[in-house]
Amino acid sequence: MNIKRFHAATSREALAKARMAFGEGTLILSNRPTATGVEVVATAEDMLSSIVPEETQNTPMSLRAPAPAPKPTPKPTPAANTAAQKTPVEQDTEQLAMSTLSFQDYVRERMLRRRHEAMHGPSDMAFEQPAPPLSPSLAATLGATPAPAPAVSFAAAPAVAPTFQPHIPKAAPLRTRESAPAAPVSGAQAQGIVHELQAMKDLIEERFNTLAWLGQARQDPLQSNLMLKLIRAGYSPVMARACLERLPEDLSAAEAVRWLMDVLVRNLKTDADTRPLYEEGGIYALVGATGVGKTTTTAKLAAHCARLHGPGSVGLITLDTYRIAAHEQLRSYGRMLGVVAHLAHDRAALQDLLGLLSGKKMILIDTTGVAPRDPRKREMMDVLDLPGVKRLLVLNAGGHGDTNDDVMASFKTTGTQYAVLSKIDEAVKLGPVLDSVIRHQLTLRGVTNGQRVPEDWEAADAGKLVRASMRSAAKSAFDPKPADLSFFFSQPVSPSSLPDGVVDA
Amino acid sequence: MPDACMDQGASLRALTPRASLRLVAVIRHGDPRAELPLLWQLCSALDACGDRVAVLDASTPESQGHPGLLQLVDHTLWLSDLTQGTPAWPILPAALGLQALQHKGGAHDPDLQALGQLFKGYGVIVVYGRTEPLAHWLSACGATPLVAVSPAKATVLSAYQALKRMHQAGLAPTLVSLMDQADENAQQQAESVRQTMRHCAKTYLGCETDVLTIRSDPREEGLSDDIRRLALHLLENAVAICQDAVVPSWGTTGAQAPSIRSH
């Protein structure tokens, strides 16, 4: 039998000694403070299996040290607490002493100890429970030195571990055109050739159709002008073509413009037929890229709900443990509203909080802004994958069309997809974002048009947004001229960019 | 007076409810070695949230040598007299003062408004005391007290006794199983305590109750995430004391459902 005791000044040193003696299979039997430091009793795992009966092998910590012959203990629950090593009288004495210790005395002792450590540096004395006072009144003991606590080494309080490890996202892989893999056998090779021929046929047809359409458009100045207007407003060539292909003939210029705007309005989904978010209630997680205004939008929605239904109707949670002072920012808003802003680090904590706030009319969850290709995005989406939690994608209204497309594709979710347009007041052109919203068939639940909380929030009005997008802006270096239009349509249109039946014209 | 600076929250301030004091209760039942450090950590966390904290120790009676809430209620002393030289937060003996407030307002309507006026400028009052003298008072306030169960032996029994007493008074406390270490053994103990409390509550009291598991190392100076979360949990369920009226924890008044609140 090979059970050894190891003495050291600190627990860490004693454990290191035990590990040096028994290697990786070290089994700690007991760990208790002594007058000179810490005593650890340990053995090797394989030794224990040979001497301890099977039913007690699962509770090695219940063995008391020193134990010349380990006996099976009847109690299944282990007691690793150092208090278990003391005699019952000592335990009762300590219990009685603590029971008479008031919170005021406890706080005074703790503050004194803290001041002492600040002046003399962290001591080796254990920061355990305060020693029982020498007399019932703490005032009598303030002048005396405190009773020497057992000289257990003070394990420095570990710094609060950062909850997020910064991760440098890998560079996005370049998009390459998909190509059919080389067929190893002749049958597959033949099929590959067939596929390529079909693709070439589609390409030629598309080119001829485009040329025919361009020719027709040039011959029809109205269509040409409308196309130019759409492109200048920021709409994509795909959208422009999809709309104008269906333009009825024999319309005057004014009627054609009205028709075009009606098409765009009809295809831009909003919640005009339903109640606003803050009246409908529910659990909403605001997601989106960095810097789009998620936290401010959260505050606006919370304020509107609190104004209508009272502060008790709103729950605020943030999952943002990455941005500096994210929780503090939401807490500041919450304080102004009379609402507590909670912080959740993981899915389990979020679930607990949703249970705590289950009686609220509306629960808003602010999240960390992540780029579409950020590997953290998947992790965050998994945390939000809880029943009843709906996602609200916050989009920068002034964003570039490709950027918005990327964001919408990466934050895509099952079911109805909701979005909020932010920073409408800063956007020079609304065409790109409206174009993306139409093509991805998102439902707009609101727009924000400023920084003020809560007044810079409006319901999403499709007509108003489309009219604003088509309003002529000042001349821009990015606006095409009529002669440039053919360049927009010289590349084949990808069939996936506009699913069939998306544009209702 | 100069005009306040305009910022994006200027209009939001118009919606800000009147400054209210929040009342939180922590029950003392069996293991001061775990309860006092937990109370310390909770007060620190509440203080870190930006709220001024005051502690009413309902287990300590006031006296000439140790004045407290009773002297404030009787207006024989000012709060500033009692808070001079306090190390961290004002900790006042309050056993007799709370009884006086109850007598003043009535058995079912303690005079919390007086408490709010005595502690103007404070954000949170933490009442700490034994179950018996506090149960009816807390029930009348509509508070949700906190009962912490440590791994030490016999605390499960005392915690259950406290739970039973509060259940009889119509209270639905928040139960917490404490883990003083992060190892697997401590987790198993905490889970065992959690299951035991849930089983006893369901079998003998007929109520479904959830038990939170909180890591609270009394030796640590810093605040763990669990403690911060628990502090916010307590704030969420706190009783708001305004100048005009008492608003119980958001949603329900009077008897409260154990775990689900309706709005």
Image: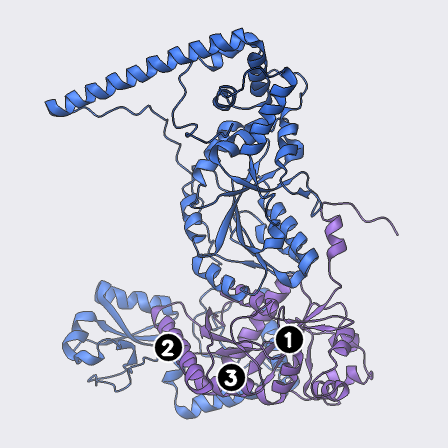
Chain colours: A blue, B purple
Q: Quadrant of residue B41?
A: bottom right
* Foreground pick, B23 / A157: B23
Residue where numbered disc 1 is placed:
B253
Report the mark closest to the observer, 3 or 1.
1
Q: CA distance from mark 1 to mark 2?
A: 33 Å
Say yes or no: labels 1 and 2 on the same chain. yes
A222, above or below A141, in the image: above
> Residue A53's x, y, as percent?
17, 81
* Disc marking residue B192: 2
Which residue is nearer to you in this view: B193 or B166?
B166
**In this view of the protein, can residue B29 be seen by the observer?**
no
> Does residue A124 show up?
yes
Q: Give the residue type that dot 3 points to.
A: Leu
Q: Quadrant of residue B184?
A: bottom left
- Bin the neighbour count of mark 1 within 10 Å (Cα to Cα): few under 14, some 14-19, many 20 and up: some
Q: Secondary structure at mark 2?
A: helix
| Amino acid type at mark 1 | Thr
Query: Residue A420's spot in the image, x, y percent?
Result: 57, 41
Answer with mark 1 or mark 2, whichever residue precedes in sequence.
2
Residue found farthest to the bottom: A89
